[in-house]
Amino acid sequence: MKGIGVSPGISIGKAVVINSTKAALTGVLLRNSAEISAAVNSFDDAVSLAVKEIEIIGQNTTLNLTDDELAILETQIELLSDPQLRDDVVEQINTNKKNANDAVIEVIATTVQIFQNMEDEYMRARSADIQDIGNRILKHLNMQNQGLSQKFESGTIIIAEDISPSDAITMDIKHVIGFITRLGSKTSHAAIIAKSKGIPAIIGCGDDLNTIKSNDIVILDGVTGLLFINPDQQLVDEYSQKKSVYDARQIRLKQLRQIPSITTDGAAIQLLANISGADDMESVFDNGGDGVGLFRSELLFMERDTFPTEDEQFEFYKQVALRSKNKPVIVRTIDIGGDKQLPYFNLPIEQNPFLGYRAIRICLDRTELFITQLKAILRASAFGDLKIMLPMISGVQEVRDSKKIIEQAKQELLKDNIQFNNSIEVGIMIEIPSAAVTADILAKEVDFFSIGTNDLCQYTLAVDRMNEKISYLYDHFNPAVLRLINYVIGQAHQHKIHVAMCGEMAADPMATLLLLGMGLTEFSMSAPAIPAIKNIIINNNLATAKNIFNKAIAMDSSQNIVAYLQEVTT
Ligand code: PEP
Ligand code: MG
């Protein structure tokens, strides 16, 4: 089977299949009274969670639900609370020793059938509601029993529909040696998190993945995107050998951490890390990082049920500052929305979430949230070389408005006599084409740029970064993307401000010389990717890089550029 290899490395382990799209009968019978009462309890808990979930949807004013929609939700709550449903399920559990999952599937199937056979059209239509509440109960049951929140045995390879950023953060990953998903693309956040944790991962496998069952033995090659299910011994031996070679190379590359990243003709290149919290700092220095080029602060907001207070956020940023050894740390203000949802924020469901209410747009609308975060970052700036970075900037007005709010946050701290770095640098992500083409204007307003190729590609090429069906179009070597990047770097140099790249392109070994040739000297990536990029930098010179860039930028298609880069970089 083949998917997209997004986090390199080879793993051989046992599959644990999570949240398969459709709950299926397991046929497992309960053995004793303890198991029976546990099954009844988990059914009751799942029903309570399902009721709560519907209540939250009903109370979400931003959804603007119509009276009809609210009535459907009310009906579903009534159906969930129907004593007949509970009696039927409990009977299956008690009398037939069915486990809770199987009992619910059977009772719901029978009830749906009864409703579908009714004369009354209104009642017939209720069968869809019964199926829906059944799915909700099953979802919560399976979350308790085999969801991503469970403890895993060592050597587990997770097989899932998708892994949301919050799943990836809250999951017990100590024993997880690989991720494989049906959906997703190279820059989905599941991929980014797998990479930063150094866990091999393959995503976007499509429906073929449904054939894998829990306990199957799986070989996962995160470089090629190949996976093998229940391989024979010969294949296991072959991949064990490949794994040893790969792991040995990683260890060798890691030893480069003491060596400065300087090209053979003396250009010093900064290699920074992308992190999501203080726990990642060890890996930054372990891999020879020169600091943090992107601290995705929103991940703190995702692990919780409520917004963190200013003090809680201050502690979070301060911990990173204290572990930064006085190296720079660029803290990005919250970039929620799009694929990064906060359940407690009740963001409205949008037709085009990536083009919608997200990131800086939310911060400039909900200024109380923005000020709280800014004050927390400013307070932490007394403990390390912190900088502020604004995501999703589309034009100069957003920069000016944000700077006013930063000034307001500073004034509030000054009034309260709280220490912070008053000359903290403020930069922006260049990840929307309108920002890239107005880099000349924006450069006059900020201290630095950081090019976010993950979003820049999706917006420039009109390709949803999460959609595996069109992932072949998602390509940072597309001439349109390269021209934008080159323009941004040129404008930053002209206006004498720093420019870095923190999107996934910075970690692509095939892009390193091309970017050096454009004049990029600051690269930020998941920490485990740093050694391989450093290896390229210390073995090449700028003259070669410029030559490669000049040739590539004159080419008319990504296919030609990639073929050329493959030839000169391997
Ligand atoms: C990017 O868009 O390139 C980026 C680094 O931000 P994120 O991946 O968090 O959207
Ligand atoms: Mg982005």
Image: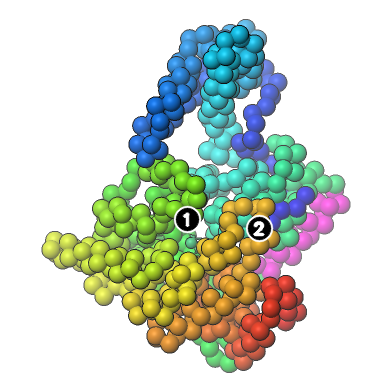
Q: Which residues are magenta?
A: 233-251
The type of residue carrying mark 1 is Leu
The quarter holding residue 18 reads: top right
In the image, what residue occupies the spot 61% across and 22% down? 101
Q: Is residue 219 left or right of residue 184?
A: right
In the image, what residue occupies the spot 13% across and 61% down? 416
In the image, what residue occupies the spot 48% across and 12% down? 82
Residue 240 lies in magenta, yes or no? yes
Q: Foreground mark, 1 or 2? A: 1
Q: How many marks?
A: 2
Relative depth, front residue between 208 and 113: 113
Q: From the top left corner, tell me how far across and down residue 175 is, in percent.
A: 60, 46
Numbered circle sitting on residue 452: none
Q: From the top left corner, tell me how far across and down residue 34 is, in percent.
A: 55, 15
Sort mark 1 into few (<14), some (14-19) or many (20+) by Cα contacts within 10 Å. Answer: few
- The answer to whether residue 191 shows anywhere in this view is no
Image height check: is 340 above or below 496?
Answer: above
* Residue holding disc 1: 355
* Residue holding disc 2: 471
In the rendered image, which quarter contains the C terminus? Answer: bottom right
